[in-house]
Image (cartoon, rainbow, N blue to C red):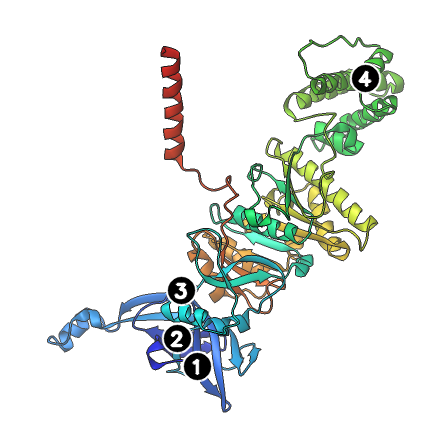
Amino acid sequence: MKVEEQAILGRTVEALSPRLVVVKAPQPLPYGEYVAIDYIAEGKQVTALGIVSATQYAHAVPPSALKYVRPEEVPYEFYKLSEMRVYIVAELVGEEVEVPRYPIPPDSPVRLATFEELRKLYPKKKGVRLGVLDVEITKRRKEEAEEEGSELELGIEEEKDSKLGLEIEIEADKLAKHLLIAGATGSGKSNTVAILAEGLAAIGAPVVIFDVHGEYWNLAVRPKFKNEVELKVQNAVLNPWHIPVPVFAHLIVSEGAATKQRRLLRAAIRHLHNELKDGVTAEGLRKVIERLGGKASEEEEDIRETEEITKLYRKALILSVRWVRRAKGSYDDKTVENVVDKIEEFFEVAPISLSAEPLLKNMSHGTVLVIDASLLSDEQKRWTLKLIVDELLERLKKEKGKASAVLVVEEAPLFMGKEVSHPVKESLRKFAREGRKFGGSLVVVSQRPRNLDIEAASQLQNFIFLKMVQEEDVEAVMNIADNLEENLASMIKTFPEGRALVMGEFMGKFPAVVKIDKHKGKKVGATPNLTELWRRAKEEVKTKSQHYDA
């Protein structure tokens, strides 16, 4: 589209580097807006495309000075200018898109970038849609989009409140280099995960979300994906039969110094499982209990079979501990009783089921598998995630070239934080290092990137940065993402919910400011409407009261 003189919004006044230019204009532009700056370099017409990364608005001359020098001049409000900093993303030289090389000359005209120019910067991919480029939809841009014969493909969300904009997709193959999604509470992290997981599953990926807070249990697949994506939710219930003996012993006796207790417990678990040769059944457990010198009393008639088996297993395990003590004679009474107490306590508080399926049994292509770990303690979450990560990596290695998986880890500092000294951190490091070679992609989600382990974070080469307000977190993501410059990072603090800076190999050569699609099927995780909850609860109480009075 031809650039008309009236389209000029302001002019450059200073180039601080080929990447950064100062612009002055009568009116400020919003953070994240895309502008174009036209100039001549080495006899060639160049169009620099940039993002407004800082802006301010003030009197061109202080009112007090203006009143003193020219008291009868025009009203003061006419003497205002906005000073903006524009981060130059790329340069268009003819049809070529190049990295900025030239400082932009002063007085160069600044205008809104056109959709056609932006599409050259962000070409259409056969990938996963994240959202639309977050630009102001002006009359000129609407006209451009409606021009006859235009080849532009504009993204329009299904929701009525969505914005027209240039569709932005990520290249799914590049997720082999892993992904960090970072943002403060309420910035839109879980919505972004839902959009990404659904889009990846739609093209056939097996996606596993380790759900720490129970944010995805009622996720609903959006209508346009209902025939392509299957959603499965599985509670992270612990089944001792499927857990490696050393891990199960560590779950029950978690204190680092309690090595003697864990040794006794490991021997007891192995002995019990050797006794259960035909699998875990109520009848089989009763026989084991009797062989160990106990009495397997019949449970109440109304107890569920799963609960009965769990109670029988606990009793059999305690008897097995005492059997090991008698058989080996190397453990004192205090050690035995401490182990018994911890078994009793563990089975009282932990979600255990001897009939629960293996955690990754429902993982399959085209499926989003949500593993809800919200009922587990932090220690149990760590061990459970370690089991998942280790099994996943083993599967990928075993089926090299035939298998793939995307693992999403919410609340990542709990598992791979700087201060975490737990085996799960090494498992995640190993998955990040080796998984990419075998079809494994790791998506790390964090609201405190400053707490992430440096070694693990260094393996992440794709990024979605939502709003972050803490300076330490912004500095942390600048250290993690080598190409994230300070002037671009400064925008992150100003983002509204759902807006993100997207960069990395899966985005292409150039970073983008994207308005992430709103996932209407994502009902949990957003800040609750407290007044609505209170009003609804009050009405329910009132209705019940009227029913009882009647």
Residue in the foreground of this view, choosing between 242 and 1 = 1
Q: Are marks 4 and 2 in contact (CB under 8 Å)?
A: no
* Residue that carries the numbered disc 2 in the rendered image: 111
Q: CA distance from mark 1 to mark 2?
A: 9 Å
Q: Residue at x 78, y 49 (%)?
A: 396
Q: Give me the disc on residue 136.
A: 3
Q: Quadrant of residue 254?
A: top right
Q: Secondary structure at mark 3?
A: loop
Residue in the foreground of this view, choosing between 11 and 469 = 11
**Horizontal and vertical percent position of residue 354:** 74, 25
Q: State which quarter of the image contains the N terminus.
A: bottom left
**Going from the N terminus, do you reach mark 4 or mark 1 first?**
1
Q: State which quarter of the image contains the C terminus.
A: top left
Q: CA distance from mark 4 to mark 1?
A: 80 Å
Q: Secondary structure at mark 4?
A: helix
Residue in the foreground of this view, choosing between 236 and 548 = 548
Q: CA distance from mark 3 to mark 1?
A: 20 Å
Circle 4 Cα neighbour tier, 10 Å, few/some/many (<14 / 14–19 / ≥20): many
What's the amino acid at mark 3?
Answer: Glu
Q: Is residue 190 left or right of residue 331?
A: left
* Residue that carries the numbered disc 1 in the rendered image: 38
Number of marks in the image?
4
Q: Is residue 362 left or right of residue 92?
A: right
* Residue that carries the numbered disc 4 in the rendered image: 285
Q: Nearer the viewer, mark 3 or mark 4?
A: 3
Residue 326, compared with residue 120, is above or below; it is: above
What's the amino acid at mark 1?
Answer: Asp
**Going from the N terminus, do you reach mark 3 or mark 2 first?**
2
